[in-house]
Image (tube, rainbow, N blue to C red):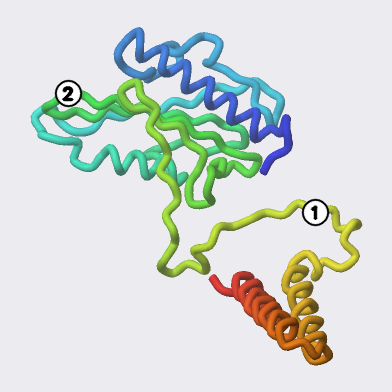
């Protein structure tokens, strides 16, 4: 999570602008820019949100495959995986904070060329910006004038600690004298209610009321167990 106006969000906006500029180049030339002078002049440089200085967009180019091959040979997936994993491109220059790195690649096949363009940004530690899940980086993938959606995170059934959704709680600690109440408040209330109804059922002579109180006590006990189990179990 980043605060409004943070340099990370500013960098993400610059990345979006670079991607739009690359799309405009594709509409005009039917291929993505392979050097800076093929991009919109306003997007050849940008203000680095971490340094406050003007910075140049970095564009690497590459060509793969042959016009005689039937398919892409798995190159599209390989390039995509490299982009969203934050791995380095071949011969990628040294990364720096606030950098916007673009990779323009053409994959030749018998059915035609596959034009791809990748935009990535690097944070204050010169590491790829993290995307919607820690497994993926914030990358923009363009392919033949279409934005390719980033794959959603898969449920980690193997070698992972949990398959449950993860939540972030933002709480003012000064307003919470006892943080245990926040985590176990529901279980505590249900336990108290189960105890109270159990005591009441012993002191009431009416069979009907006694039975109802015991049912309420049983329900509260089950709900207490469920609350505690949902908190500890994966």
Q: Nearer the viewer, residue 114 or 106?
A: 114
On the rendered structure, is 95 left or right of 186?
left
Local secondary structure at mark 1: loop
Q: Alpha carbon of mark 2 to alpha carbon of mark 1: how far?
A: 55 Å
Marking on residue 171: 1
On the rendered structure, is 155 left or right of 226?
left
Q: Nearer the viewer, residue 198 or 40?
A: 198
Q: Give residue 88's position: percent from left, percent from top.
A: 43, 43
The image shows a total of numbered marks equal to 2
Tell me what residue is drawn at x 78 percent, y 81 percent. 197
Crowding at mark 1 (Cα within 10 Å: few <14, some 14-19, many 20+): few
Marking on residue 112: 2
Local secondary structure at mark 2: loop
- Relative to 186, say whether 138 is above or below: above
Sequence-wise, the earlier of marks 2 and 1 is 2
Q: Which of 205 and 176 is in front in this view?
A: 205
- Which quarter of the image is occupied by the N terminus? top right
Quarter holding residue 192: bottom right
Quarter holding residue 174: bottom right
Marking on residue 147: none
- Which quarter of the image is occupied by the C terminus? bottom right
On the rendered structure, is 47 left or right of 199?
left
Tell me what residue is drawn at x 39 percent, y 27 percent. 147
Q: Give residue 171's position: percent from left, percent from top.
A: 80, 54
Crowding at mark 2 (Cα within 10 Å: few <14, some 14-19, many 20+): some
Tell me what residue is drawn at x 19 percent, y 33 percent. 65
User: Of the residues tagged 2 and 1, which is closer to the observer?
Assistant: 1
């Amino acid at each position: 999570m980043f605060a409004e106006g943070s340099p990370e969000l500013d960098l993400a906006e610059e990345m979006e602008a670079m991607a739009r500029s690359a799309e405009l180049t594709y509409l005009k030339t039917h291929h993505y820019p392979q050097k800076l002078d093929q991009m919109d002049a306003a997007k050849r440089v940008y203000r680095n949100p971490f340094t406050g200085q003007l910075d140049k967009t970095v564009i690497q180019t590459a060509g793969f495959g042959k016009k005689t091959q039937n398919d892409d040979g798995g190159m599209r997936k390989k390039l995509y995986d490299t982009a969203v994993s934050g791995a380095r491109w071949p011969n990628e220059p040294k990364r720096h904070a606030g950098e916007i790195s673009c990779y323009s690649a053409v994959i030749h096949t018998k059915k035609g060329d596959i034009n791809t363009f990748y935009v990535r940004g690097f944070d204050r530690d010169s590491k790829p910006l993290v995307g919607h899940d820690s497994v993926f980086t914030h990358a923009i993938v363009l392919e033949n004038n279409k934005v390719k959606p980033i794959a959603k995170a898969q449920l980690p059934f193997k070698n992972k600690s949990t398959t449950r959704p993860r939540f972030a709680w933002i709480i003012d600690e000064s307003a919470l004298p006892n943080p245990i109440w926040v985590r176990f408040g529901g279980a505590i209330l249900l336990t108290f209610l189960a105890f109270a109804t159990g005591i009441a059922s012993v002191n009431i002579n009416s069979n009907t009321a006694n039975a109802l109180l015991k049912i309420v006590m049983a329900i509260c006990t089950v709900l207490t167990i469920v609350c505690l189990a949902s908190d500890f179990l994966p």
